Image (cartoon, coloured by chain):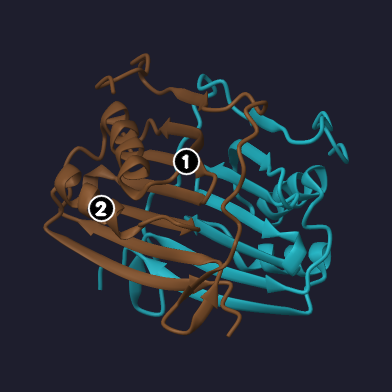
Chain colours: A brown, B cyan
Amino acid sequence: MPESIIPRATPYETYAAPESDGRAGESRNDYFVEQDGDRFAGTHLILDLWGAERLDDMAYIETVLRDCVTASGATLLHIHLHRFTENNGVSGVAVLAESHISIHSWPEHGYAAMDVFMCGETEPRRAVAVLRAAFRPKRIEIGEHRRGRIS
Amino acid sequence: MPESIIPRATPYETYAAPESDGRAGESRNDYFVEQDGDRFAGTHLILDLWGAERLDDMAYIETVLRDCVTASGATLLHIHLHRFTENNGVSGVAVLAESHISIHSWPEHGYAAMDVFMCGETEPRRAVAVLRAAFRPKRIEIGEHRRGRIS
């Protein structure tokens, strides 16, 4: 995976890289999962990273999001990142066959608000290990929702 | 706003409509908000809709997401929707200057997992009223996180 495939225009940029042309016949892992007697659509992790590094580096953040997708065994459909002029913050969303990953960063606070929502046969918690290694946060708060709980 | 601007190719499609060419000088509402003595980055609503309608209608869902953005006073930067072959489910993400809105729908269950994350001077709860009117869910579960709480 290249370190950066994003043209580094300044002072801000918009980048969209459709991963699919819509013709590849990708299917959604849409079956509800069962775990601990619950039946639910998927796991939604709410992640707050504090004292984190490289939150202004859009190319790096794209690489990290892609690494999260790979580590979790998910399938990337579309990725979009946007850098803001005022604070070099980055918003990024990876749309997955299994839901999404998002990041919104405030580099001036060392803070990133992220979420990792995955359905089907994926391992969303593996993304957390990727994020710890990549952004080296001093503190990380993790909330978890079982989305679409039936039982 | 047009009812539909999406080519309705079947059986599945990928659609990305960048709202900005990255040259418009949009700024982020990145200041932390203060409310009830808390200082935090923004409000993240976790929404589970059950018994909902039109969850397989991608063009309609795009219109609804755009209506949510308008109602909340947010700024749309990028919107992407994707329809899945297996169940006509839709995944959609609207990237905002103030964070994001997402939807992942399972029409066969009448279920949609949504989230509305907004920072700055926006009214994310107004999006909930839009969603109730648009998808007419029999039941809606709402979770709320104050993201990036400092105090």
**Pointer 1 local density, CA inside 10 Å: few below 14, some 14–19, many at least 20:** many
Asked if the residues shown at circle 1 and circle 2 are in contact, with their CB atoms under 8 angstroms apart, the answer is no
Q: CA distance from mark 1 to mark 2?
A: 27 Å
**Pointer 2 local density, CA inside 10 Å: few below 14, some 14–19, many at least 20:** many
The amino acid type found where label 2 is placed reads Tyr
- Which corner quadrant of the image does residue A59 belong to? top left
Q: From this view, report whether residue A80 is shown above or below residue B136.
A: above
- Read off the chain for label 1: A
Question: Which label belongs to residue B126?
Answer: none
State the residue position of label 2: A111
Mark in the foreground, 1 or 2: 1
Q: Nearer the viewer, residue A1 or B35?
A: A1
Q: Is residue A80 left or right of residue B69?
A: left
Q: Nearer the viewer, residue B51 or B141?
A: B51
Quadrant into which the N terminus of chain B falls: top right
Q: Where residue A75 sits in the image (x, y, percent)?
A: 47, 41
Of the image marks 1 and 2, the number of the one nearer the N terminus: 1
Quadrant into which the C terminus of chain B falls: bottom left
Q: Nearer the viewer, residue B86 or B20?
A: B86
Looking at the rendered structure, the secondary structure element under dot 1 is loop
Question: Which label belongs to residue A75?
Answer: 1
Q: Where residue A56 sits in the image (x, y, percent)?
A: 26, 35
- Read off the chain for label 2: A
Q: Is residue B97 left or right of residue A122?
A: right
Residue drawn 83% across the image and 58% down it:
B54
How many numbered discs, if any?
A: 2
Q: Where residue A96 sits in the image (x, y, percent)?
A: 51, 44
Looking at the rendered structure, the secondary structure element under dot 2 is strand
**Do pointers 1 and 2 mark residues of a single chain?**
yes
The amino acid type found where label 1 is placed reads Thr
Residue drawn 79% across the image and 79% down it:
B138
Q: Is residue B123 visible?
A: no
